[in-house]
C-alpha cells in the first residue's frame, strides 16, 4: 500500500487541476485517509485543496487531521466556514479538537455556534482542561452501564445506541449513580457470561485509571505500559469523564519522542513532517540554537587566548604543541558527554530513571567515566609520547594529555548526567539539555582543566612555557 | 500507582529474605505485573528470585517477561526446568517466544519437549520466520469464521471457545477455505448486525495486512499508523497466519526508538532499562564507539600539525591567532551537522522521508546550510574583526573566518544529510551514522577547509605566515 506512494503522488498531481470529482474519488477509492494524507503532503497547498474538495466530506475530514499542522492550517484558511463546521461535526470529539490548533481562536469560537449544540458543549468541556492534559486528549464517547444491568441489558444497549456514540465498545465501564468507576467489562466477557448475570458480578474491578489533569505524555505512557486499548479518565472528584484510546496515546508518544530526539540534536519545535516544513520554518528551528551555541563557543576561544597570553616566549613552542591536542580533548569530552546525556534523557522519558535517582546516576556515571577516561587517557598518552606512530612529544606534555583526558571525561559525564535530571526536577523537558549544549559547555570548561593540569605538571606557564 | 514505587521497592527488599509466600502475595495483591517488574528491577537478582518464587505461577510468568532481558536471563538460569516450562505454557505464544531470548538454545530446545505438543509446534512455526520479522511478533490465537457463518454462529463460536484461545476477539477474521483473508468483522459490528446475516454480507473487506516476512519495526509502524488494535499477518502465499496486536507493536516501536536515540548519541546496544544494566554493560556499550571516535579525532590533530609545519617563522604568530578560532569552527560544523543528522534520521525512521528523496533532502539542506552558515559567518567575522568586544584581528584573518564558516556548515549539512540516507539505502540503520560520528568527521575535514581558505586568502603559508 505504501510502496506505490510515488505513483499515487504523480497521479494526484495530474488530477489536481482537473475539475471533476469522479476521477479523484475513483483513484482514491479504498485508499485510507492516512495514506492519502501522506501522499498529499508532497503536493502544494493548492493541489492539496483541489484534491480535498473532490473527496466526500467524511474522507476529507479524516485526511485533514492526518495532515501536518502547517498544511492543515493553510488549507482550512481557504475552506468556507460551512465546510469546516461540517468536518467538526463528522469527526469524533478528540479529533475535532485537533482541528482547533489549525484555526484562529475567533473563527473556532464562531464555528462552535454553527455545529450541533451538544457537540459544541463537549468541545468546550474538553477545552476547559489544561493544555496538553489528558482531559484534552480523551473522548467522552465511551460505553457505560450500571452495576445492576445484566449482560443482556448491556448487549441491548450496544445494539440500540447509534454507532457514532462510541469511540470503542471493547470495554464497557460500570458506573455508580454519582458516576464513580466501579469496574469494567470487556465486550468479550459480556458475550461469554451468563446473559442474566449482572455487571457487578461479572465486572473486573480496580481498573487502572488516569486523571484528566495528568499530562498527555504521562497518560499516553500509562496506556502503552499496560497495553490496554483504552484507559478510563477521572476528574478531580473521582468521577469518570472519558477514555483515552490506545491509538490517540500512540500518536502522542510518537510526537513526544520525535520532539525529544530533535531537541537532543539541538533542534527545537514540534513534531512536524520534515518535507512539509518550509526552508524558513526549518531555519527558525535551527538557527537560534546554533547562534546560542556559537556565542557560547566564543568562551572556548577566550580560554585558549587567556592561556596563550600567559605563555612567555620560552613557552610558545610548548604551547603550539599543546594546541595540537585541543580538538582531541574537547572531542573526547563532547562525545562522552553526548553519550551520557542521551542515555539519561531517554531513561527519564521512559520513566526508567526518576529525578530522585540523581545520586545513583551520578555515582554510576562517575565510575564509568573514570574507567572510560583512563582508557582514553592511556591511548592519548601513547599518541603523544610514542615516536613514529605517535607524535614523539616530551614525557611531561604526554602525561598532561594522559591525565587531562580522564579529568575531562569525568567532568563531561557529571555535567551530562546531572543537567537533564536537574532540568526534569525544575519541571523542564530534560531534552532541552541537548547533546550539542553539553558538548559546547564541555569544550570551554574542558580546556580549562587541560591547561590547569599543564600549569601544574609543566610548572607555572611563565617558567616552563 | 507508580508514585508509591519507592515504598514498594523498600517493602519488597524487606520481604525478599523472609520465607513465606503469604506476606509477599498480600503486598503485591492487585498490583499489575508491569509495576511489580519495574519495582523488582531495583533489587538484586537473588531478591528478585526470592520474590518471584513466592508469586503464583501466572503472575510470576508475566512479571518475568516484563523484566529487562539481562535480569530475566539471570533469574531463568536459576529456575528449574519444570517452572520455566510451566511459564512457557501459561504465557501467550508471542510472549513465550520472548522467553527464548533469555534461554540458551539447548535448554529452550529441551523445554519444547516438556510443554504441550501443539504449543511447542506453534513456537517452532513462529521461530521458522526470519529473526526480527513480523512472523516472530505475531500470535496465531485470533478469532476466525467462514463467509457463510451467520452473526449468531460467530457469537456462539466466541462463547464456546476457551478464553485462552484468543489474544483478542475485537476483530473476527473471515477466511476462505484455503485460508485467504476475505474480510473482517469487528465484534461491535457482529453484535449490532442482524443475527441471521452472514459474515460475507456484514464484513468489512479489503483490510490492511502485513507479511509475516516484513520487518517487525515496519509492521509495528503499520499498526500504529492506522491505529487498529490488531493487524492480520499473511504468509508468502497470501494465507492468514496470525495477527500482530497493538500492544506488541507499541513495545517494538518503543524499543526501536530507544535504540535509535541511543545510537544517535553514540551508544550502541539494545533498549534495556538503564538501571538494570551493570557498569560493565554500560561501558561495553560506550567505550568502543568512543575509542573509534577518539582515534578518528587523531586525524584532526594531524591536520593541525600539517599546516603548522607549513608555516615558517614569519607565519607563526598568524598561525597562533588562527588556532584560537579552531574550536569555534569545528563546534559550528559539529552542531549544524548534528542537527541535520538527527532530523533526517528521525524522518527516515518515521517514513516521512524515503531513501529515494535523497536529492530533495540534499538540496534543501544545502540551501539551509548556506543561509545559516552565512549568518554564523557574519557573526564570526565580527567576533574576529571588532576591537574591544571582538579580537581585533587583521581584516584578512577575519575574512578567512567569515568565509570558512558557511563553507564548513555547508559541508557538515551535506555529510549529515547524505550519510544517514546512504546507510538506509545500503540497508543499515541510519542511526548508526550517529551525531558524534558526523561531528568527529566534520572536525578534521572542516579544518582542512579552514586552512585551505586561509592559504588562498592570506596567500600561500610560507609567504604571509
Image (spheres, coloured by chain):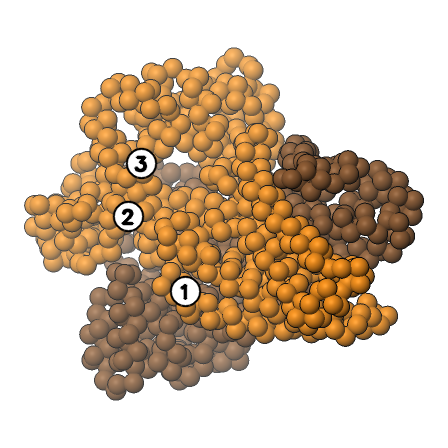
Chain colours: A brown, B orange
The furthest residue to the bottom: A19
> Which residue carries the number 3 mark?
B94
The answer to whether dots 2 and 3 both sit on one chain is: yes
User: Label 1 marks which chain's residue?
Assistant: B
- Would you place residue A47 above or below residue A226 in this image? below
User: Is B340 placed left or right of A207 in the picture?
Assistant: right
- Would you place residue A411 above or below residue A5 in this image? above
- Tell which tag, 2 or 3, sits nearer the viewer: 2
Q: Residue at x 7, y 45 (%)?
A: B177
| Dot 3 crowding, Cα within 10 Å, few <14, some 14–19, many 20+ | many
Q: Residue at x 55, y 50 (%)?
A: B437
| Dot 2 crowding, Cα within 10 Å, few <14, some 14–19, many 20+ | some
Q: Are marks 3 and 1 in contact (CB under 8 Å)?
A: no
> Which residue carries the number 2 mark?
B214
Q: Are marks 2 and 3 in contact (CB under 8 Å)?
A: no
Percent coordinates x, y for residue B14 in the rendering: 60, 20
Q: Is residue B59 visible?
A: no
- Secondary structure under tag 3 reads helix
Could you give the CA–CA distance between mark 2 and mark 3, rounded to whole angstroms? 16 Å
- Tell which tag, 3 or 1, sits nearer the viewer: 1
- Secondary structure under tag 1 reads helix
User: Is B20 placed left or right of B331 in the picture?
Assistant: left
Depth check, front residue: A430 or A401: A401
Q: What mark, if any, has residue B358 been given in the picture?
A: 1
User: Label 2 marks which chain's residue?
Assistant: B
Q: Are marks 1 and 2 in contact (CB under 8 Å)?
A: no
Percent coordinates x, y for residue B144 in the rendering: 17, 44
Percent coordinates x, y for residue A441 in the rendering: 71, 53
- Would you place residue A118 above or below residue A386 in this image? below
User: Label 3 marks which chain's residue?
Assistant: B
Amino acid at each position: 500500500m505504501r510502496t506505490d506512494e510515488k505513483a499515487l503522488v504523480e497521479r494526484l498531481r495530474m488530477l489536481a487541476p482537473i475539475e471533476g470529482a469522479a476521477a479523484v474519488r475513483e483513484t482514491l477509492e479504498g485508499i485510507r485517509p492516512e495514506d492519502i494524507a501522506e501522499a498529499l503532503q508532497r503536493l502544494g497547498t493548492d493541489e492539496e485543496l483541489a484534491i480535498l474538495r473532490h473527496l466526500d466530506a467524511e474522507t476529507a475530514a479524516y485526511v485533514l487531521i492526518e495532515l501536518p499542522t502547517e498544511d492543515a492550517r493553510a488549507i482550512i484558511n481557504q475552506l468556507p466556514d460551512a465546510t469546516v463546521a461540517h468536518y467538526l461535526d463528522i469527526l469524533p470529539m478528540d479529533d475535532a479538537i485537533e482541528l482547533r490548533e489549525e484555526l484562529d481562536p475567533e473563527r473556532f469560537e464562531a464555528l462552535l455556534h454553527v455545529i450541533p449544540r451538544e457537540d459544541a458543549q463537549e468541545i468546550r468541556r474538553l477545552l476547559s482542561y489544561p493544555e496538553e492534559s489528558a482531559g484534552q486528549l480523551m473522548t467522552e464517547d465511551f460505553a457505560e452501564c450500571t452495576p445492576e444491568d445484566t449482560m443482556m441489558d448491556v448487549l441491548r444497549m450496544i445494539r440500540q445506541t447509534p454507532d457514532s456514540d462510541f469511540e470503542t465498545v471493547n470495554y464497557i465501564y460500570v458506573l455508580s449513580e454519582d458516576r464513580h468507576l466501579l469496574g469494567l467489562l470487556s465486550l468479550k466477557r459480556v458475550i461469554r457470561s451468563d446473559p442474566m448475570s449482572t455487571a457487578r458480578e461479572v465486572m473486573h474491578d480496580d481498573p487502572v485509571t488516569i486523571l484528566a489533569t495528568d499530562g498527555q505524555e504521562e497518560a499516553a505512557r500509562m496506556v502503552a505500559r499496560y497495553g490496554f486499548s483504552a484507559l478510563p479518565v477521572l476528574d478531580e472528584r473521582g468521577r469518570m469523564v472519558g477514555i483515552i484510546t490506545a491509538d490517540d496515546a500512540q500518536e502522542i508518544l510518537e510526537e513526544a519522542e520525535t520532539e525529544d530526539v530533535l531537541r537532543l540534536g539541538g533542534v527545537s519545535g514540534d513534531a512536524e513532517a520534515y518535507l512539509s516544513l518550509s526552508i524558513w520554518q526549518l531555519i527558525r528551528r535551527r538557527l537560534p540554537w546554533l547562534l546560542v551555541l556559537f556565542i557560547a563557543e566564543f568562551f572556548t576561544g577566550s580560554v585558549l587566548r587567556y592561556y596563550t597570553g600567559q605563555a612567555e616566549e620560552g613557552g610558545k613552542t610548548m604551547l603550539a604543541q599543546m594546541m595540537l591536542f585541543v580538538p582531541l580533548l574537547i572531542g573526547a569530552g563532547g562525545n562522552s558527554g553526548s553519550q551520557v546525556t542521551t542515555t539519561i534523557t531517554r531513561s527519564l522519558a521512559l520513566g526508567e530513571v526518576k529525578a530522585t535517582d540523581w545520586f545513583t546516576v551520578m555515582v554510576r556515571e562517575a565510575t564509568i567515566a573514570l574507567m572510560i577516561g583512563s582508557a582514553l587517557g592511556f591511548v592519548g598518552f601513547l599518541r603523544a609520547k610514542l615516536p613514529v606512530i605517535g607524535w614523539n612529544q616530551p614525557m611531561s606534555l604526554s602525561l598532561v594529555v594522559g591525565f587531562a583526558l580522564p579529568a575531562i571525561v569525568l567532568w563531561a559525564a557529571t555535567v551530562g548526567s546531572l543537567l537533564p535530571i536537574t532540568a526534569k526536577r525544575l519541571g523542564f523537558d530534560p531534552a532541552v539539555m541537548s547533546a550539542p549544549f553539553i558538548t559546547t559547555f564541555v569544550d570551554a570548561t574542558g580546556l580549562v582543566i587541560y591547561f590547569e593540569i599543564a600549569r601544574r605538571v609543566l610548572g607555572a606557564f611563565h617558567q616552563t612555557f
